[in-house]
Amino acid sequence: MCIAIPMQVDHPEPGHAWVAARGERRRVSTALVGAVERGDWLLVFLDSARERIDAARAAEVNALLDQVQGALLGAGDPGFDADFELPSRMDPAALAALTGQAT
């Protein structure tokens, strides 16, 4: 699975930027978003900035990524609350509603 990660510009360069987030730092292309400044937030996919985002949107995406990571790490842990119900734990009516199927 490939997903976009919000990353913050640490050091801009012409056509590229060094960005950091979630414990990693990398150099990405900024060809699709234009010139960037230190502190800007970018949505990065496959080492390319695809979209400029604000800090609030970066926090939302990071919160969702934290929930997904927690669900993956907490699978089978009855004390873990992922703030959503996994489809495998839904009753047939709830699963049908989720997928848009009539019961």
Image (cartoon, rainbow, N blue to C red):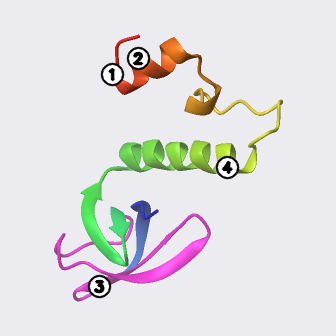
Question: Are discs 3 and 2 less than 8 Å apart at CB?
Answer: no
Q: Amino acid at mark 2?
A: Ala
The one of 92 and 64 positioned closer to us in this rendering: 92
Q: Amino acid at mark 4?
A: Leu
Tell me the distance, in whole angstroms, between the alpha carbons under discs 1 and 3: 43 Å
Q: Residues within 10 Å of mark 3 (few under 14, many from 20)?
A: many
Mark 4, residue position? 72
Choose top left, top right, bottom left or bottom right for residue 89. Answer: top right
Q: Residues within 10 Å of mark 4 (few under 14, many from 20)?
A: few
Q: Position of residue 95 (x, y in %)?
A: 49, 22
**Upstream in sequence: badge 3 or badge 4:** 3
Q: Which secondary structure lies at badge 1?
A: loop
**Upstream in sequence: badge 1 or badge 3:** 3
Q: Image check: 103 left or right of 77?
A: left
Q: Which residues are magenta?
A: 13-40
Q: Which secondary structure lies at badge 4?
A: helix
